[in-house]
Amino acid sequence: MQKKLSLTFSELDENTPIPYGLLLLADPSKKLIDEYLKESQTFIARQDDELVGIIVLKPLSKELIEIKNISVKPFFRGQGIGMYLIKNAIHKAWAGKYEHICIGTANSSIGQLYLYQKLGFEIC
């Protein structure tokens, strides 16, 4: 039986080091990460005191925000953390008055595409 996760979702503050190890799991360029982090909000999921996932939201216009990076530590994958991150990010985007949310992705795995579609995103 799998242990129920007790997750918390919060914005990454300026006193916390940028978790490049986690961000680089979803984006292979530290230079690009540094560029979009300047204009983005970064949120983290913690299990107890351990950072287990991250999601980055970057505004593209007054109405549109993009999920720029989403990553879950490999050991914690398959436990609903990705869904947890996306659902919380959607709530943050709505609270920020964004009308549309997009996820830009390359050839993702079928599992990732399935998750995005399950949460209401459409492939275009």
Image (spheres, rainbow, N blue to C red):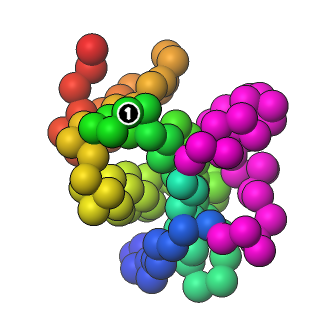
Residue 85 drawn at (x, y percent): 42, 58
- Nearest the viewer among 77 and 102 is 102
Quadrant of the snapshot with the N terminus: bottom left
Q: Residue at x 49, y 41 (%)?
A: 58
Q: Is residue 13 visible?
A: yes
In the image, residue 74 above or below residue 58? below
Q: Which residue is mark 1?
A: 61
Amino acid type at mark 1:
Ser
Q: Which residues are magenta?
A: 13-40
In the image, residue 47 above or below residue 73? below
Residue 119 drawn at (x, y percent): 23, 44
SS at circle 1: loop
Q: Is residue 91 visible?
A: no
Position of 19 compared to 75: left or right?
A: right
Snapshot quadrant of residue 38: top right
Q: Residue at x 66, y 83 (%)?
A: 49
Residue 106 drawn at (x, y percent): 51, 18
Residue 50 drawn at (x, y percent): 67, 76
* Residue 52 among those drawn in magenta: no
- Nearest the viewer among 101 and 121 is 101
Position of 106 compared to 36: left or right?
A: left
Snapshot quadrant of residue 96: bottom left
Q: Residue at x 80, y 35 (%)?
A: 30
In the image, residue 108 above or below residue 43? above
Position of 77 compared to 75: left or right?
A: left
Quadrant of the snapshot with the C terminus: top left
